[in-house]
Image: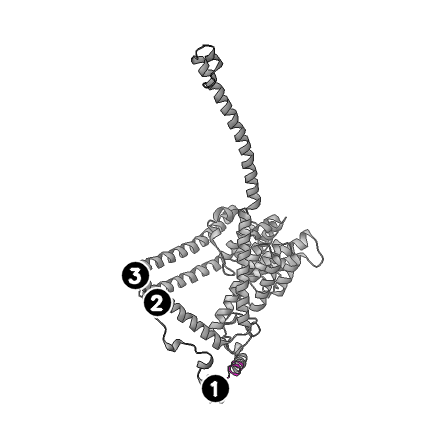
Amino acid sequence: MGKKGNSKANDGEKWGHDQHQDRLHKKIDKQKSSQEAQSSSSSKAIKGYHRSMLLSHDNHEKRQEGKLRLHISKTKREIEAIRRRLKSWDEVSERQQRRKSEEEEMKKRKREDEESAPGYKRKRKGRLGPETWKLRGAARPAWEVYDFDTRYIDPHMKAHQDALERAKRSLNTFHVCKGSFGKYDDDEGNKLEDRHGNNSPLMIESCRKFLSLSMQYALLNLEARKFKSARETLLEIIELEGVNTLKPLTNARCRLMRMYLEANRPDSARRLWEKLPTYYSSIWIRYSAALLEFVSWKILEEKGSSEESAKKLLAQAIRSNVYCAYYIAFHETFQQVMEYTDEVEDAEDGTLDQAIEYYNSEEMGNWVGTEGAVEWIRSVILESLDGDDDPESDEIGLKKSDLEWEEKLVKVEKDYEVMASAEDKNEDEVEEDSISEKEDLEGNGEASEVDFLMFTGMFRTGMDMLTDSGAFSSA
């Protein structure tokens, strides 16, 4: 018995080319249909897999939020650690701890240098000598155990005496240094050593580190849209630095004012600028106050606000920084002239750099977005330029001399040239270690000089364009 064959073969018919082709085509069609069925089922599985993957894994935004939360927690722990030290500051213990950390750092650096030297072989650690042994129980000497021995020292009494001495030396820096926290001198340049009693460099360094970490913590909370924590931190910094100080170490006041404007809290912003001294010349405070008073008087028509109060605040703002007034009033012209303005950060009060920084911030959008605000400041400038200086004018009125910008700009440029020449002289007196370091210093100096002179030149060009176009023709 053999294998069952084909019916056509049994009938004696021979397979030809056509029969083979038909059978091959049927087989190929069957394979294609099975592949299409498998692909459709796999595509559905893939779609479901992508959906589950998106639901089970965080996207880029969530990962960044997680990193931000971790950074906030880490900064908060560092602040609490240094806060505990500053609340019970002990100069002796802090110096010992600093000396110990410096010695450990030197040993670590020395060990790294030895290990990086060519041909270094790690030394095998031998058995420690008896001088390192810690005796316990009956093996201890008598003077460590029995109180009748004259050399016996009670560890509990010794710890108590050390704690009493530490308490006598300790002081609360938040109370002692409040109003001039982290500063050696006051606004007038007088030393604060007599006032603090123990104004050591180590304590001042720790105070400044606390302020730096607090500002970092506030900025991180602002980025995370946690305005309550940011507000509490900024207010604490302002209280420590002193409300009446004119030269704070941080920009906590400016950040708080910008936060109030961003969160639409005009009442809080008003309380802030009314609490600060009127001769504080920060552009972020003065021009924000003028804008809010203009909105209260012109747009909202609130009780207690008037054109006189708005002009008074605007006059204070212009006296603090006259460049910003021209910048806002004729921002279309300066926008065409000024370049590389996004590189300016943390400029000093009353300077052209601070006016440029203010223009590139969100505050300029508030001025342009407020109906009639730019036209109002422009009309006040033209009206003041058209008038004469009145020697009997009070602080409400704006004098023509308050809008003088060219003399101030020339003076600043001369002061910068004197400072740059003094720095070049000091660099010539100091012996350089290598030619490459000298070239780096010269390159950095030239870059900073070009940046400063570039901004002053562009501002002067913008004012010349306004004069040629007749923008001050009514003056």
Q: CA distance from mark 2 to mark 1?
A: 39 Å
The kind of residue on which mark 1 rests is Tyr
Chain part drawn in magenta: 154-160
Q: CA distance from mark 3 to mark 2?
A: 24 Å
N-terminal label among 2 and 1: 2
- Considering only vertical position in the picture, is 307 above or below 89? above
- Viewer-nearest of discs 3 and 2: 2
Residue 68 placement: quadrant: bottom right
N-terminal label among 1 and 3: 1
Whether residues under marks 3 and 2 lie with C-beta atoms below 8 angstroms apart, the answer is no
N-terminal label among 3 and 2: 2
Residue found at the very far front of the displayed protein: 1
- Residue 231 % position (x, y): 61, 60
Scheme of image coloration? one colour
Q: Give whichever of 73, 25 is nearer the camera.
A: 25
Give the number of the disc on residue 152.
1
Residue 73 appearing in the image: yes
**Mark 1 neighbour density, 10 Å: few (under 14) some (14–19) many (20 or more):** few
Identified at 35% across, 64% down, the residue is 112
Q: Which residue is mark 2?
A: 110
The kind of residue on which mark 2 rests is Lys
**Mark 3 neighbour density, 10 Å: few (under 14) some (14–19) many (20 or more):** few
- Considering only vertical position in the picture, is 101 above or below 225? below
Whether residues under marks 1 and 3 lie with C-beta atoms below 8 angstroms apart, the answer is no
Q: Which element carries disc 2, helix, strand or loop?
A: helix
- Viewer-nearest of discs 2 and 1: 1
Q: Give whichever of 428, 457 is nearer the camera.
A: 428
Residue 471 appearing in the image: no
Q: Which residue is mark 3?
A: 434
Q: Which element carries disc 1, helix, strand or loop?
A: loop
